[in-house]
Image (cartoon, helix red, strand yellow):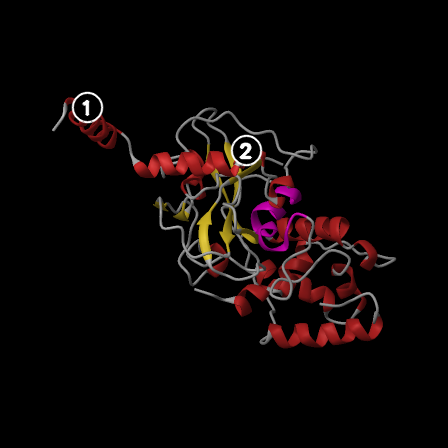
Amino acid sequence: MSLFDRFVTQRTRTVARATGRRHFLARLGATLAGTSALPLLPVARAATTESPRAPQPQEQGDPLSCDYWRYCALDGLLCSCCGGSANSCPPGTEPGPVTWIGTCKNPVDGKDYVISYNDCCGKTACGRCNCNRNEGDRPVYMPAKSNDINWCHGTANNLYHCSTSVVLGLAVE
Amino acid sequence: MHLPAMLALSICVLAPAAHAGPRLDYTLNCMGCHGVDGLGAPPEIPQLKDRMGYYLDVDGGRAYLVQVPGARQSALTDAALAGVLNWMLDQFAGASKPAHLDAYSADEVSRLRATPPNDIAAVRRDLERAIVALHPRGYSD
């Protein structure tokens, strides 16, 4: 093998070892989709304050990780890994108007925030970043409190693709 | 699991806050299904906006608003549920708001919660028929 070939092979192997395709694709997908520019899900207008959009809390942690503070009751797939974000649905999916609402404690300020776990619907399951956390969840014999139910209702079809975690505001009156 | 029928009579409930007023109670116990604007997701989840008040115009409707499973089986106390219902009527009744509106009390809610009908779906069907007869143009689901 020529010196050039050896160099390229070496570099390619190094890159393949050092980077995660899933992580890269997730980030690339989110960037291409321009998710920060997409409008917030309708439910995000529901603020517990008077302002049209709830002030967003200071946050830390990785939205691509199941440990992220907002995901304390997320049982499903993370939309941030699927071309969307914690606030928005991937292209080609529709946010469910019906949602599971809970509260999670933000480690930055120690306060409880209201979280809306809208599902993104219309395509088959994203298949990435499975997360199974259940704070406040109850078994399915209490269906209104169960996060295992498919919450894709009121959408064009009820295929579940992934879940978001929209912060609605502080859990105070 | 897909439970449209059950959801038609349930309200999405989660993790009630330790100390909350009616707006937050609605957010945590009702808004998941009925929506921030009370639009719901018909036909499985009824629209409250401009409709909810009509139930107070027909016999049995006032009781129904307490006895519908999403309200009755919520984690709210009787006093809190009365507060939420009064708040919801104020926020969402809109065009359907009756001229005279008696606020729900904790006692009334307690009494109604203790005596649920055997077939709530049948009760709802009858109420809808009565409402449509009264307000043919103003009500459609």
The spot of residue B84 in percent (x, y) is 66, 50
| Circle 1 crowding by C-alpha within 10 Å: few under 14, some 14–19, many from 20 | few
Kindly give the residue lying farthest to the right in the view shown: B99
Instruction: Tell me, yes or no, whether dots 2 and 1 are on the same chain.
Output: yes
Residue B4 position in % (x across, y down): 53, 67
Question: Mark 1 belongs to which amino acid?
Answer: Phe
| Magenta segment includes B90 | no
Closer to the observer: label 2 or label 1?
1
Decide: is A64 above or below B60: above
Does the residue at mark 2 contact the one at mark 1 (Cβ under 8 Å)? no
Residue at 59 percent across and 55 percent down: it is B33
What is the magenta segment's predominant secondary structure? helix
Q: Is residue A65 left or right of residue A19?
A: right
Q: Which quadrant of the figure has residue A167?
A: top right
Q: Is residue A152 left or right of residue B49?
A: left
Protein chain holding label 1 = A
Which residue sits at x=66%, y=62%?
A: B46
Q: Quadrant of the N terminus of chain A?
A: top left
Q: CA distance from mark 2 to mark 1?
A: 41 Å
First in residue order: circle 2 vs circle 1: 1
Question: Horizontally, is B128 left or right of B75 in the view?
Answer: right
Q: Which residue type carries mark 2? A: Ser
Residue A155 placed where, x, y %?
A: 57, 58
Q: Which residue is located at x 63 percent, y 36 percent?
A: A173
Q: Which mark is residue A4?
A: 1
What residue sits right under mark 2 in the picture? A36
Query: Is B32 within the magenta?
Result: yes
Question: In terms of secondary structure, where does tag 2 sit?
Answer: helix
Chain letter belonging to callout 2:
A
With respect to residue A79, does B100 lie above or below? below
Q: Which residue sits furthest left?
A: A1
Which residues, given as a range, are shown in magenta? B22-36
